[in-house]
Image (cartoon, grey):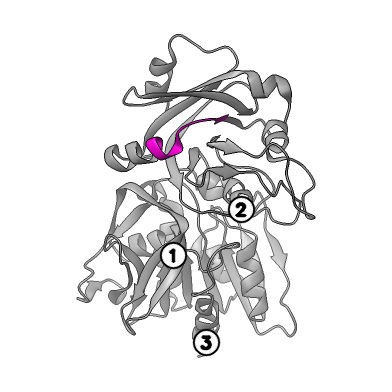
Amino acid sequence: MNPSRATAPALLVLEDGRTFRGQAYGALGETFGEAVFNTGMTGYQETLTDPSYHKQVVVMTAPQIGNTGVNDEDPESSRIWVSGFVVRDPSRVPSSWRSQRSLDDELASQGVVGISGVDTRALTRHLRERGAMRVGVFSGDLPSDAHERVLASPQMVGADLAHEVTTPEAYVVPAVGEKRFTVAAVDLGIKRATPRYLAQQGCEVHVLPATTTAEELLALEPDGVFFSNGPGDPATTDGPVAAAQGVLAADVPLFGICFGNQILGRALGLGTYKLRYGHRGVNQPVMERATGRVHVTSHNHGFAVDAPTDGTPVDTPYGRVEVSHVDLNDDVVEGLRCLDARAFSVQYHPEAAPGPHDATGLFTQFASLMEG
């Protein structure tokens, strides 16, 4: 850790005026975003590089962060996407045979402003009680008008962010072994693990920008279409919704994860809403309604689909749809299954790495849907 950064003062200011003082961690400067907390005890590198965290300041509830340093194998994308990072007790010296750099130096090199020495338990409890809100993190020269700057920063509601994190041009991930299917994957903030899981099912994966239309998707003559995770408010992301409607109309198998679940919901005519503080971590219990089986799952979402969770099917322009999975903590919709169309989705991350692997069979389910 750079001594000059470690001794520089830092300040975290929430939208409602509550403040926390600490020391600089990562780059010196200021940053703004939505304050959210992640309950994972491991996987901070995957969290930092998940594009779904774009425009968010992540508070880690695990007290010690940075113990295993940073390597070049675990990132879920080509860069760190979080707007800021909040930790209680950063590791002074990383200890892992896989470590190549310290987390503090990695944050600094990518210009990510953070703060350490914060009572993250108190901060997390505050966010649970008051809800996710705007926040600013300042280090080095602390401004006198910090709260005013936070109030002037943009909110997450109404933010259309998928186009800011998507791939600028299409690329192909080849199938592992014999090619069985061609899959068109719409990148709304896709993680590297997702095409790998699809490739293991024999899929040649064409990863496409978020602006791809239904006509362009169908021109590939895919066996299936995938909609990825991603950041922002699904109520503002109209292009991918129209693309999903085109896929549904063409009766091509469709699979969505996280943001892709919300896109499918909107394509079917369902609404979405913002959760009070969201689900972020690797320990969320989700029940599959058809079997009663409970999966421990990895989550990263602040919005959810508005649909009945009592098993009542909903009529849509594409046939009936039912809620297939629910979160046992708060009964939030965690999956959709079309009864008259070849489409399904989940709100959680079966491809999470690290994370639980209870639900990786969903990729096999998608392959079966394409095969059938």
Nearer to us of marks 3 and 2 is 2
CA–CA distance between discs 1 and 2? Answer: 28 Å
Badge 1: residue crowd in 10 Å (few <14, some 14–19, many ≥20): many
Please, what secondary structure does the residue beneath circle 3 have? Answer: helix
Of the residues shown, which amino acid type is indicated by label 1? Ala
For residue 244, the mark is: 1
Question: Which is more toward the observer, 171 or 157?
Answer: 157
Residue placed at 41% from the left, 58% from the top? 241
Say if 196 sits above or below 280 in the image.
below
Specify the segment rendered in magenta. 115-123
Reading the image, the residue beneath label 3 is: 368
Please, what secondary structure does the residue beneath circle 2 have? Answer: helix
The reply to whether residue 347 is visible in this rendering is no
Nearer to us of marks 1 and 3 is 3
Asked if the residues shown at circle 1 and circle 3 are in contact, with their CB atoms under 8 angstroms apart, the answer is no
Check residue 105 for magenta coloring: no
- Residue furthest bottom as drawn: 372
Question: Picture coordinates of residue 365 (x, y %)?
Answer: 50, 82
CA–CA distance between discs 1 and 3? Answer: 20 Å
Nearer to us of marks 1 and 2 is 2
Pointer 1 or 3: first along the chain: 1
Q: Is residue 210 left or right of residue 346?
A: right
Of the residues shown, which amino acid type is indicated by label 2? Glu
Q: Is residue 153 left or right of residue 273?
A: right
Residue placed at 20% from the left, 73% from the top? 310
CA–CA distance between discs 3 and 2? Answer: 29 Å
Pointer 1 or 2: first along the chain: 2
Question: Picture coordinates of residue 92 (x, y %)?
Answer: 69, 36
Asked if the residues shown at circle 3 and circle 2 are in contact, with their CB atoms under 8 angstroms apart, the answer is no
Reading the image, the residue beneath label 2 is: 46
